[in-house]
Amino acid sequence: MKIATLQFAPKLGQVNENIAHADAILSSSSTSLHDIHLLVLPELAFTGNVPFPTSSSSKNSLWSTHTELTTTTITGYNHPSLESITPYLEPTAVGPSTRWAILTARRLQCLVTVGYPELFSHEPPPRSTLKPTMLDIGPAEDYYTLTAYNSTVTVNPRGEIVAHYRKTNLYYTDEVWAQESPEGFTTSVLRFGDRKSGRQISAAGVDGENGEEEGQEEEETIHTTTHAICMDLNHHHFIPPSPTPPPSPPSKLCQHILNTRTTLLVLSTAWLTHLPSSALHSQPRDFDQDTLGYWFHALEPVINNIHGREVICVFANRCGEEPGRIMPAVGSKLGEDEGEGEGVRYAGSSWIGKIGVGRGEVVVGGIMGRAEEGVLVVETEGLGVGGNGLRFQLRERDGDGGGAG
């Protein structure tokens, strides 16, 4: 199976420009995209991590979330209220991000996953149960509610929605505008076939047609697929994995991957880096070793316990910088070095590979640089066989295995 990720640096709130930029990168790619099966984009791919007002005077507005701001004004990655991201929210699976995914999936004849800020309309719960991120509109006797989620949508080559996922573990910058997924982690069964004979990618129970032309029989690959977004990789409310014994218990995402026997993990992210801007731009094609090591460490319970069952991993991150700063106390290393105050910087380093090829081993088929825009394409068939792929081995800790090497 051939998988692609698009790594780029979207500009804050410039949806149309970001879509045009993504199209330009795809069109100018030196790697052929005509036979890829899956294309994955980052978290909030076209909105960027939306800017917000530097004033907290919006508390009396219709869209107020009643969220108290800290005394320090934070801009860039953080959203102080739902009001700030409201202009960029997209109705569930019908907004500009989904429309782009449909057009691109039809054009490239592949499955496309893209992250977007979702606005979901639903029947209102009792007022006493409304949360700050649920909007109460209209008179008391006749109102409806809208909920915002940090989501991804997946479309097949016919332009049909085959998977939709809402972020489960929110970062603190999500919590003021988005709500956790009520479903938690979910898994879809996706079918990958030969497009030349009309075989399409579909989700079990959604697309009942096999897409064959003239009765041709073509082999298809079925993957139990788990979608995740950024901080889903961590424990709830960001408990970082322990670097020393005793090891942290498996995160809920790792438990889900193991329990569902997932064979394809698709993670869209906007992962930050502590590297200063000078380091990003002096070596843009080098991947961020600390970030890659952290990702492997977070997946350690899966890497060391799938007993020879391979899992294809697709990590689609963004790159670039935004003005402002983030709070370093929530796990980011910002503030620990000269990088503090230079702005919000993203780690890039999108990668495609496999875990489970050997115990404690990660095989990376391809990886982007930390400040590099472009398309990464990897053929996963045969990855890990012989010298195919870049291999990383996790150290086993005394007792039960753990720790990144």
Image: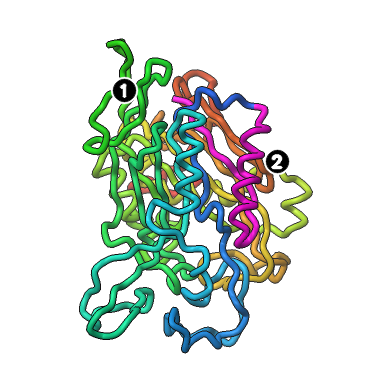
**Element class at badge 2:** loop
Front one among 213 and 180:
213
Magenta region includes residue 19: yes
Q: How many marks?
A: 2
Q: At x 43% / y 71%, what residue is drawn?
A: 175
Q: Is residue 242 visible?
A: no
Disc number for residue 285: 2
Q: At x 45% / y 59%, what residue is drawn?
A: 90
Query: Residue 21 at x, y = what percent?
Result: 65, 45
For marks 2 and 1 on the same chain, the one whose residue lies earlier in the sequence: 1
Magenta region includes residue 270: no
Query: Residue 221 at x, y = what percent?
Result: 33, 24
Disc number for residue 116: none
Q: At x 69% / y 67%, what residue is drawn?
A: 323
How far separated are the C-alphas under marks 2 and 1? 40 Å
Please rate how many residues cluster around mark 2, counting C-alpha atoms within 10 Å: few if below 14, some from 14 to 19, many from 20: some
Nearest-to-viewer mark from 2 and 1: 1
* Amino acid at pointer 1: Gly
Please rate how many residues cluster around mark 1, counting C-alpha atoms within 10 Å: few if below 14, some from 14 to 19, many from 20: some
Among the 4 quarters of the image, the one containing residue 251: bottom left
> In the image, which residues are magenta?
1-30
Position of residue 59 relative to residue 358, above or below, is: below
Residue topped by disc 1:
211
205 lies left or right of 7: left
